[in-house]
Image (spheres, grey):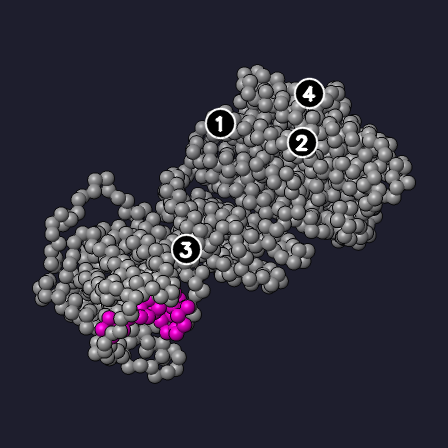
C-alpha cells in the first residue's frame, strides 16, 4: 500500500479507535475491583449522548470559554496527524516535528486553562493553577526524553525515530530508551489526569485537577473535551508504545501490533490506577522531578554514546514546506 | 619480630576485656605500656633486630620517631590512668555543668580500647603500604570512639557522633585517594604490592601525574580531617572537651601525629615524582588557614579544654607550615611534633586535675589554682609557657626553626602571617592563664551557685594525688630539657627522618 | 555481557537518584540495599581476571553484607528509634533531585575525561562511581536524620568501592574487602551510636545535636 494512503488509514483508525482506550482502562479497574464494569464501548455512547445535548453557558464567560474545547480538539487532532504511531509515516512529517508535538499538547493545555479561568469560578481557577504547575514540571521531562531518543536514534523527526525496527535491551541505546519510557510513562499519567497524579473518579472538587477545569462545560463542548482526552491518551500512549513495538514492514501487521501495544499501555494504566492511591499534592512535584531526572539521565547517556558531530548538517526539510507524507 | 609492638597491646586488649577484677587490669595496662616502651627503646638502639615484614611493614626513621613519641606518651598516660580509673570507675557522678547524673563506660571496655588504640597507632607507624596505612588509621578511629564516649551523657554522645561521622567521611575520602594513587601506577604493572612506599618511590617517574595530584589532594583532605587541619577540624573541639583528659592527651599527642605521618608518607611519594613543590605549597596554605582559624577561636574562648583543643589545631597548622616550607622547616616541624605531643599531653592531664578540683570547665570560674592546687597550678603555668613557644621549652626552638625557614624562603607574607598568628594566640591564652593561676577570692556567683565546692573549703589546699601530678611533671620536664639540649640520638633521628621527606 | 553493563550502571545511578529523592526511611533503606546488590554483582560482569570461585565468593560475601546485613541493621535502628515520620530535610527533596541531576552531569563530564588504567573497563564505570559517591556525600550533608546520614555514608562507600573496581587490576578482591570491612564496621558503630543517641535525646535529628558549639 502506498505511503499517503497508509498515513490517512492509520489516522482514521486512530480517530475511530481512540475512545476504546479509556474503556480498556476502566474495564481493567473493574476487574481489579471485582465488578463487571461498564461496556468497552461506553465512551462512544457517552460522546454520542453528549453530542445530542445542548450546552448551557454562564453569563460570566466569553468567547474564550466557547473556543476552548474546539481549539483543544483541533490541536490534539493535528498532534495525532504528526505522530506515526503505526510506524508507516504520518500525515505531517518533517525534521523537528517532535517539538511540534509537544507544542500542540501545550496548546491544548493552554486553551483548557484559560477557558477554565474564563468562568471566574474559584474551583476552576484552582484546578487551572495546579495543572499549570504540574505541566511546567512535566514538559521538560517530555522534551528531554524526546531529545534523548532523538539523539539515540539519530533523527529529529518522529518518522525517523519511531519508524525504526530495532530495540535491543542490552544494546547501548537500550538503556536510554528504557529510561525515557519510564519518564514518559510518568508524564503520560500526569498529562492524562491518571492516578497517581489525579483521580479521574473523584467527586470532590477540591481534589480535582483536570475534572474541575472542565466542570462548567456541557453538551457538545463537553463531547469535544471527552473525545479530545481520548485522543490525547492515544497520542501519548502511542509515543510510548512505538518506542517498544518492533516494526515488521507489513502495514497490516504494524497497525495490528500498534493497536495491541496501545492496549497494553491502557492495561498498564489500569493496573497502576488500581494498585496505587493518588499521591498527596505536595508529592506530585517530587514524582515529576523524578521523571525529569530520569529523562535528564537518559539524555546525558545518549549524549555520551552519540556525541554531537562538529559540523551539524542542516535539517534537510526545514526550509521546505512540510510534505503531506514522506 | 616487628609485629610484636603491634600484637602485644592487641592481645592485652582482649585479655583486659575479659579480666573481671580492676587491679589486675590496671597492672596489665601499665605493664603492657612499659613493655611496649621498652620494645620501642630497644628498637631505637638496635634497629637491625627488627627486620621488615616483607614489603608491608618496616620501621624507618620517620616511623620510629613517631612510634617513640606515641609509646612514651602512652606509658606516662597509663600511669595517670591508674589514678584516674581508681577515682572515676564505677561511680555515678554529677555533671558539673548541668547537674544531671551520669554513668561511665565499664572500665574493662575502656582499658581494652586504650590498649587497642596503642596497637593500632603502632600499626600506623610501621606500615609501609598505603592500603595497610589506611586500614590502621580507620582502626584508630573506630577504637577511639568508645574512648571519647567514656562519660555517658548527651554531650559526649554528640561529640562522639560528630567524631565518628566526620572522621569516617574523611577516611572514605582517603580511601578514594588511595585508589587514585593505585590508578597512577602505570598500566600492566599493578598488583597489590605496587602500593608500598618503596615501590612507588622507585617508580616515581613513571607515575601518572594527574592521578597522583588528585590522589594527593584527596589523601590530604581525608587524613587532614583526622589531623585536625582547618577547615576539617570541626570534630576536634567537641571531642577533646568531652572526652576524659587522658583520652584527650592521647588524641592530641599521638593520634594527630599519626595522621600527620600518613600525610608525610604521601608527600614523600609526591616529592619523588616531582610534585614536591605542589604538595608543600598546599600544605603551607592549609597550615596557615589552620593557624588563623585556631587563633580566631582561641581568643575569647571560655572553656579551657576547648581552648587546648584549638591550640592543637593551631599546632597542627604549624606542623603543616613547617613541612610546607621545607629545608630547616622539615627539621623544625618534626621536632615540633615531639614537643607539642609532650606539652599538649601534659596540659590535658593537668586540665583533668583542674576539672577534678574545681568541677567546672569554664576558665572564668577557675581562679587561684596556684593556691589551691599548687603543684598543678605551677605545672599549668609551665605548660602554657611551653605550648606558647616560650624559652626554655622545646617549642621555642622548633617554632624558631620554622620561622627561620620562612625567612629563608623569601616569602614575607608567610613570615608576617606566621608571627602574627603566633602572637595572637599568645595574647589570647596568656590572659586566661594568669586569671586561672592567680586570682584570689572565689567569685560571689560561684559561691551562690554552689554546685561545686562549698565556700569555706573553696580556697583551701586540695590534696593532689601523686599519680595525677607525676605524669605531667615528667612530660614537661622532658620538653623543658629538649629546649635546652637536644640529645644527639634525637637530633640524628630527626635529621634522618627529614631527609626521607625528599627535597623541597 | 558487556552490553548489559551499561544498563547495569544506569540502574546504579538510578538507585542513587532514588536515595536522593525518597522521603520515607524504608524507601531509602531499599535504595541502598538495591545498590549493594548491584555492586555485589558488578565484579562478575566486569570480566575481571581472577579464578571464578574467588569472584563468586566475593560476590556472595558482598551480597550478604550489603544486600542483607546492612539493611537489617538499618531496619533494626529504624524500628528501635520508631521513626517512620519523615523529617523535613535541610535541602528539600525536589531540590535534592535537581542537584542530583547536576551532579550527574558533572560526573559524566569529568568522569569520561579521566584516563582509565585498564583497557576493558566500560566508559560509564568511573562516572557512575563518582556520582554515587557524590550523592552519598550530599545526603550526609543535606539530611537531618542520623540514620539517613549513615545511609548516605553507605552510598558513598558503594561509590568508592565501584571506583576501586574500575582501577584495581589484578587484585580487585582486596580492594573490595577493604571497602566492605570499612562499611561494615562503620555501619555497626553508627548503628550503636544511633541507638544511644535515640536513648539520650529521644530523637535522631542530627541537626539538633548542637549543644556543643562556640557561641559567637
Q: Which residue is located at x 13 percent, y 66 percent?
A: A8
Chain letter for mark 3, please. C
Chain letter for mark 1, please. B
Q: Which mark is residue B299?
A: 2
Mark 3 or 2, closer to the camera? 2
Chain letter for mark 2, please. B
Q: Which residue is located at x 62 percent, y 46 percent?
A: B162
Mark 1 or 2, closer to the camera? 2
Q: Which residue is located at x 24 percent, y 71 percent?
A: A221
- Badge 2: residue crowd in 10 Å (few <14, some 14–19, many ≥20): some
Disc 2 secondary structure class: loop
Instruction: Say which quarter of the image contains residue C17.
Output: bottom left
Vertical placement of B158 versus A239: above or below? above
Residue that badge 4 annotates: B397
From the viewer's perspective, is C6 left or right of A227? Answer: right
Q: Earlier in the sequence, mark 4 or mark 2?
A: 2
- Badge 4: residue crowd in 10 Å (few <14, some 14–19, many ≥20): many
Marks 1/4: CA distance? 27 Å
- Badge 1: residue crowd in 10 Å (few <14, some 14–19, many ≥20): some
Marks 3/2: CA distance? 49 Å
Residue that badge 1 annotates: B278
Marks 4/3: CA distance? 57 Å
Q: Are labels 1 and 2 assigned to the same chain?
A: yes
The N terminus of chain A: image quadrant: bottom left
Residue that badge 3 annotates: C14
Residue C124 in sight from this viewpoint: yes
Disc 1 secondary structure class: helix
Amino acid at each position: 500500500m502506498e505511503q499517503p494512503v497508509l498515513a490517512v488509514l492509520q489516522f482514521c483508525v486512530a480517530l475511530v479507535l481512540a475512545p476504546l482506550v479509556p474503556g480498556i482502562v476502566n474495564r481493567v479497574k473493574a476487574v481489579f475491583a471485582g465488578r463487571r464494569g461498564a461496556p468497552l464501548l461506553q465512551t462512544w455512547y457517552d460522546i454520542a449522548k453528549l453530542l445530542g445535548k445542548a450546552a448551557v453557558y454562564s453569563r460570566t464567560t466569553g468567547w474564550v470559554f466557547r473556543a476552548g474545547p474546539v481549539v483543544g480538539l483541533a490541536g490534539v487532532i493535528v498532534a495525532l496527524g504528526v505522530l506515526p504511531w503505526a510506524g508507516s509515516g504520518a500525515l505531517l512529517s518533517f525534521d523537528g516535528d517532535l517539538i511540534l508535538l509537544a507544542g500542540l499538547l501545550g496548546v491544548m493545555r493552554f486553551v483548557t486553562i484559560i477557558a477554565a479561568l474564563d468562568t471566574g469560578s474559584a474551583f476552576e481557577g484552582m484546578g487551572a493553577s495546579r495543572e499549570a504547575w504540574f505541566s511546567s514540571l512535566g514538559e521538560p521531562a517530555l522534551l528531554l526524553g524526546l531529545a534523548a531518543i532523538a539523539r539515540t536514534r539519530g533523527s529529529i523527526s518522529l518518522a525517523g525515530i519511531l519508524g525504526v525496527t530495532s530495540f535491543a535491551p542490552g544494546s547501548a541505546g537500550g538503556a536510554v530508551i528504557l529510561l525515557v519510557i519510564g519518564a514518559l510513562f510518568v508524564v503520560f499519567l500526569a498529562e492524562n489526569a491518571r492516578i497517581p497524579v489525579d483521580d479521574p473518579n473523584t467527586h470532590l472538587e477540591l481534589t480535582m485537577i483536570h475534572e474541575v477545569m472542565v466542570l462548567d462545560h456541557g453538551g457538545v463542548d463537553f463531547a469535544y473535551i471527552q473525545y479530545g482526552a481520548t485522543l490525547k491518551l492515544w497520542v501519548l500512549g502511542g509515543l510510548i508504545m512505538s518506542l517498544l513495538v518492533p516494526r515488521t514492514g507489513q502495514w497490516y501487521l504494524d497497525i495490528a501490533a500498534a493497536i495491541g501495544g496501545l492496549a497494553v499501555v491502557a492495561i498498564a494504566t489500569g493496573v497502576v490506577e488500581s494498585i496505587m492511591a493518588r499521591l498527596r499534592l505536595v508529592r506530585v512535584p517530587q514524582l515529576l522531578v523524578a521523571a525529569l531526572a530520569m529523562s535528564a539521565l537518559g539524555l546525558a547517556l545518549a549524549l555520551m554514546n552519540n556525541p554531537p558531530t562538529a559540523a551539524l548538517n542542516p535539517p534537510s526539510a526545514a526550509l521546505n514546506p512540510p510534505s503531506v507524507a514522506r | 619480630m616487628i609485629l610484636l609492638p603491634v600484637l602485644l597491646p592487641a592481645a592485652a586488649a582482649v585479655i583486659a576485656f575479659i579480666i573481671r577484677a580492676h587491679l589486675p587490669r590496671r597492672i596489665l595496662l601499665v605493664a603492657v605500656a612499659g613493655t611496649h616502651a621498652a620494645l620501642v627503646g630497644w628498637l631505637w638502639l638496635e634497629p637491625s633486630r627488627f627486620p621488615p615484614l616483607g614489603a608491608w611493614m618496616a620501621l624507618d626513621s620517620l616511623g620510629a620517631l613517631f612510634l617513640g613519641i606515641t609509646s612514651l606518651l602512652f606509658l606516662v598516660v597509663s600511669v595517670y590512668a591508674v589514678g584516674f580509673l581508681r577515682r572515676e570507675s564505677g561511680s555515678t557522678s554529677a555533671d558539673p555543668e548541668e547537674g544531671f547524673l551520669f554513668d561511665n563506660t565499664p572500665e574493662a571496655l575502656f582499658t581494652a580500647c586504650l590498649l587497642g588504640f596503642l596497637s593500632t597507632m603502632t600499626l600506623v607507624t610501621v606500615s609501609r603500604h598505603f592500603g595497610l596505612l589506611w586500614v590502621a588509621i580507620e582502626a584508630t578511629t573506630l577504637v577511639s570512639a568508645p574512648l571519647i564516649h567514656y562519660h555517658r551523657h548527651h554531650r559526649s554522645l554528640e561529640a562522639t557522633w560528630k567524631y565518628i561521622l566526620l572522621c569516617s567521611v574523611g577516611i572514605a575520602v582517603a580511601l578514594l585517594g588511595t585508589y587514585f594513587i593505585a590508578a597512577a601506577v602505570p598500566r600492566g604493572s599493578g598488583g597489590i604490592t605496587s602500593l608500598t612506599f618503596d615501590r612507588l618511590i622507585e617508580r616515581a617517574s613513571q607515575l601518572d601525574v594527574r592521578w597522583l595530584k588528585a590522589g594527593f589532594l584527596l589523601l590530604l583532605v581525608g587524613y587532614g580531617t583526622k589531623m585536625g587541619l582547618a577547615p576539617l577540624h570541626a570534630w576536634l573541639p567537641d571531642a577533646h572537651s568531652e572526652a576524659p583528659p587522658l583520652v584527650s592527651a592521647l588524641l592530641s599527642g599521638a593520634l594527630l601525629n599519626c595522621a600527620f605521618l600518613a600525610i608525610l608518607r604521601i608527600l614523600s611519594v609526591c616529592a619523588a615524582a616531582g610534585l614536591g613543590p605542589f604538595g608543600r605549597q598546599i600544605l603551607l596554605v592549609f597550615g596557615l588557614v589552620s593557624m588563623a582559624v585556631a587563633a580566631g577561636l582561641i581568643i575569647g574562648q571560655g572553656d579551657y579544654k576547648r581552648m587546648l583543643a584549638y591550640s592543637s589545631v593551631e599546632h597542627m597548622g604549624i606542623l603543616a607550615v613547617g613541612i610546607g616550607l621545607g629545608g630547616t622547616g622539615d627539621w623544625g616541624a618534626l621536632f615540633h611534633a615531639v614537643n607539642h605531643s609532650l606539652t599538649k599531653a601534659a596540659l590535658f592531664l593537668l586540665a583533668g586535675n583542674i576539672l577534678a578540683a574545681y568541677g567546672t570547665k569554664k576558665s572564668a570560674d577557675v581562679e587561684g589554682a596556684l593556691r589551691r592546687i599548687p603543684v598543678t597550678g605551677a605545672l599549668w603555668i609551665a605548660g602554657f609557657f611551653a605550648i606558647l613557644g616560650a624559652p626554655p621549652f622545646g617549642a621555642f626552638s622548633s617554632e624558631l626553626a620554622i620561622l627561620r625557614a620562612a625567612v629563608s624562603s623569601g616569602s614575607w607574607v608567610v613570615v608576617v602571617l606566621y608571627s602574627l598568628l603566633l602572637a595572637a594566640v599568645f595574647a589570647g591564652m596568656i590572659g586566661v592563664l594568669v586569671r586561672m593561676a592567680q586570682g584570689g577570692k572565689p567569685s560571689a556567683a560561684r559561691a551562690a551557685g554552689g554546685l561545686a565546692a562549698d565556700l569555706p573549703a573553696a580556697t583551701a589546699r586540695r590534696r593532689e594525688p601523686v599519680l595525677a601530678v607525676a605524669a605531667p611533671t615528667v612530660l614537661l620536664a622532658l620538653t623543658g630539657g629538649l629546649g635546652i639540649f637536644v640529645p644527639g640520638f634525637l637530633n640524628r633521628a630527626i635529621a634522618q627522618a627529614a631527609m626521607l621527606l625528599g627535597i623541597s | 555481557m558487556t552490553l548489559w553493563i551499561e544498563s547495569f550502571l544506569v540502574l546504579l545511578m538510578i538507585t542513587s537518584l532514588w536515595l536522593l529523592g525518597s522521603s520515607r526511611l524504608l524507601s531509602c533503606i531499599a535504595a541502598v540495599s538495591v545498590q549493594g546488590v548491584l555492586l555485589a554483582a558488578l565484579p562478575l560482569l566486569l570480566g575481571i581476571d581472577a579464578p571464578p570461585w574467588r569472584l563468586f565468593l566475593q560476590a556472595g560475601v558482598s551480597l550478604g553484607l550489603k544486600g542483607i546485613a546492612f539493611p537489617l541493621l538499618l531496619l533494626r535502628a529504624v524500628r528501635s528509634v520508631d521513626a517512620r515520620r519523615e523529617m523535613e530535610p535541610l535541602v528539600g527533596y525536589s531540590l535534592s533531585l535537581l542537584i542530583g541531576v547536576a551532579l550527574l552531569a558533572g560526573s559524566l563530564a569529568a568522569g569520561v575525561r579521566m584516563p582509565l588504567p585498564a583497557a576493558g573497563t566500560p566508559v560509564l564505570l568511573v562516572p557512575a562511581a563518582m556520582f554515587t559517591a557524590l550523592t552519598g556525600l550530599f545526603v550526609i550533608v543535606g539530611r537531618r536524620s542520623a540514620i539517613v546520614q549513615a545511609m548516605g555514608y553507605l552510598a558513598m562507600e558503594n561509590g568508592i568501592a565501584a571506583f576501586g573496581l574500575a582501577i584495581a587490576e589484578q587484585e580487585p578482591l582486596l580492594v573490595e574487602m577493604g571497602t566492605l570491612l570499612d562499611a561494615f564496621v562503620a555501619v555497626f558503630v553508627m548503628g550503636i551510636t544511633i541507638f544511644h543517641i535515640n536513648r539520650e535525646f529521644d530523637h535522631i535529628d542530627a541537626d539538633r545535636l548542637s549543644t556543643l558549639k562556640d557561641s559567637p
